[in-house]
Amino acid sequence: MKPLKSKAFIYGLLFTFIIAVISLLGSKLPFLDKIGALTIAILIAILYRHFKGYPEAYRSGIAFSSKRLLKLAIILYGLK
């Protein structure tokens, strides 16, 4: 990987990590505690993409998170 592409990949992962942390904190709120952090993260991502759009440079990290990590999260969530 080129250094610029790997840096953008890391920033894309960091971007999705920030959304995950926000959703985890949001799932502690009384009116959102029944929904769950994974559902809140998906809703935040949908709303963010609709209103703001994702930064193009971060697309590789975001795509990795949405394809690979989301599948893993859903599998682990099912085991819960």
Image: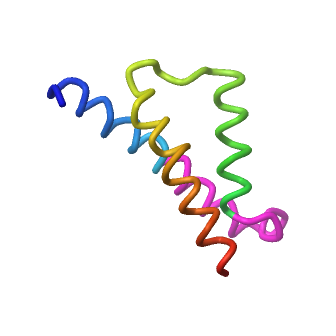
Residue 78 x %, y %:
69, 73
**Residue visible at 45% across and 41% down?**
64
Tell me which corner region of the image, top left, top right, bottom left or bottom right, holds residue 77: bottom right
The one of 50 and 74 positioned closer to us in this rendering: 74
Q: Which quadrant, please, contains the C terminus?
A: bottom right
**Residue visible at 70% across and 22% down?**
51
Tell me which corner region of the image, top left, top right, bottom left or bottom right, holds residue 45: top right
Q: In this view, does 54 lie above or below 21?
A: above
Residue 37 x %, y %:
67, 62
Tell me which corner region of the image, top left, top right, bottom left or bottom right, holds residue 48: top right
**Residue visible at 18% across and 31% down?**
1
Residue 17 x %, y %:
46, 50
**Extreme bottom residue here?**
80
Residue 23 x %, y %:
63, 56
Q: Is residue 36 above or below residue 9?
A: below
Horizontal placement of 1 versus 32: left or right? left
Horizontal placement of 70 versus 16: left or right? right
**Colour mapping used in the image:** rainbow
Q: What residue range appears in magenta?
A: 18-36
